[in-house]
Amino acid sequence: MGRLEGKVAIITGTAGGQGRAAALLFASEGARIVGCDVGRGYYADDEVTGNSQEYGQWTAKGLDTTAELVRAAGGEMVTMEPCDLTTEADAEALIQLALDTYGQVDILYNNAAKGEFAWFEEMSHEQFWRGMRQELDTVFLPTKAVWPHMVAQKRGSIVNTASMSATKVYAALPCISHMTVKAAVQGFSRHLAFEGAPHGIRVNSIAPGLIASPSTGPYLDDPEFRDAFLREAMIQRVGTPADVAYTALFLASDESSFVTAANYAVDGGATGM
Ligand SMILES: NC(=O)c1ccc[n+]([C@@H]2O[C@H](COP(=O)([O-])OP(=O)(O)OC[C@H]3O[C@@H](n4cnc5c(N)ncnc54)[C@H](O)[C@@H]3O)[C@@H](O)[C@H]2O)c1
């Protein structure tokens, strides 16, 4: 019996990277998957393809292929695309798709986000708040839409994606918006855990370190970029989406039934340094 047998999992941002890895892993453990992604148009062309040679398996992105891969492996998955989770209407439509298709939602894995990166001096107020919308509304809005259903069914596990950047500064990374908003994701998760506990809803966050994905792919073959991260990590490799997906699997499953308001670092020890 799979670790998520009988459960329905909404995973956001499933076109590639960590969202795709989670869709494949959760489905292989028996969950029925509802995925979504904002679509290729969201990224500049060079970001879409992910051009890392070494990490090509993880940096590829394709909207249709995740569901095809899940089905080819014998799993079940439906997707909504395009789906822009910075809008209330799309967030609500995503939850409705899950309810219409499977009649329940047991897991919401808020993985989707797009960061805004610039040094404070160059960052406009508009860009700063665009970062907030793209990284915090994408957590708030799907959660808001799923909440009444989880309260009514008296169970649910919500997993939010924060980042090691919530707590760690890198000289190579202009992170003022990203750091602010990922710290907010951690705070949001903790408070929501408190509010969810009486309803049987658990809320946790994951803080990944440097992970090979479509968004980091273009930079991973640059030794200067990679070394800036590896210098400050205990485990000397870049993380993979599977590393994160296995942690999400534990938090999504009943194995973690006594775990809530926790933040799990998946960063090769970087924030432990
Ligand atoms: N890759 C890393 O090094 C790293 C490190 C720490 C945290 N993270 C976080 O991990 C999560 C997953 O990122 P990833 O590494 O797989 O990279 P990614 O950028 O490939 O994955 C994010 C996915 O979310 C989708 N998305 C973005 N905004 C959306 C929106 N408004 N509506 C719907 N879909 C949207 C993107 O199209 C993309 O497919 C993100 O929250 C990211 O901030 C990544």
Image (cartoon, rainbow, N blue to C red):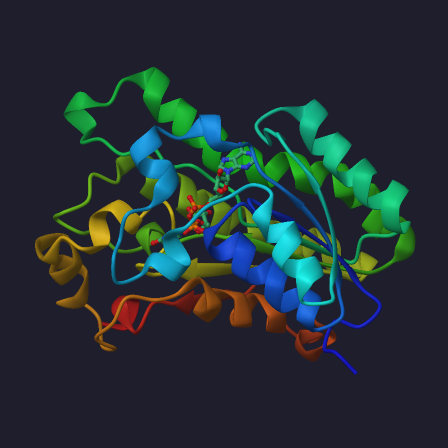
The location of residue 117, given as percent across then percent down, is 27, 34
Q: Is residue 101 left or right of residue 160?
A: right
Q: Residue placed at 48% from the left, 52% from the top?
A: 186
Q: Residue placed at 54% from the left, 72% from the top?
A: 246
Residue 32, by quadrant, is bottom right
Q: Is residue 85 left or right of residue 4?
A: left
Q: Quadrant of ligand 1?
A: top left
The location of residue 103, given as percent across then percent down, is 91, 49
Q: Is residue 148 left or right of residue 206?
A: right
Q: Residue placed at 47% from the left, 37% from the top?
A: 135
In-front residue for pair 146/4? 4
Q: Residue placed at 18% from the left, 60% from the top?
A: 229
Q: Is residue 252 visible?
A: no
Figure quadrant of the N terminus: bottom right
Q: Is residue 87 left or right of residue 183?
A: right
Identify whether 219 is placed above or below 113.
below
Identify whether 33 is placed above or below 48.
below
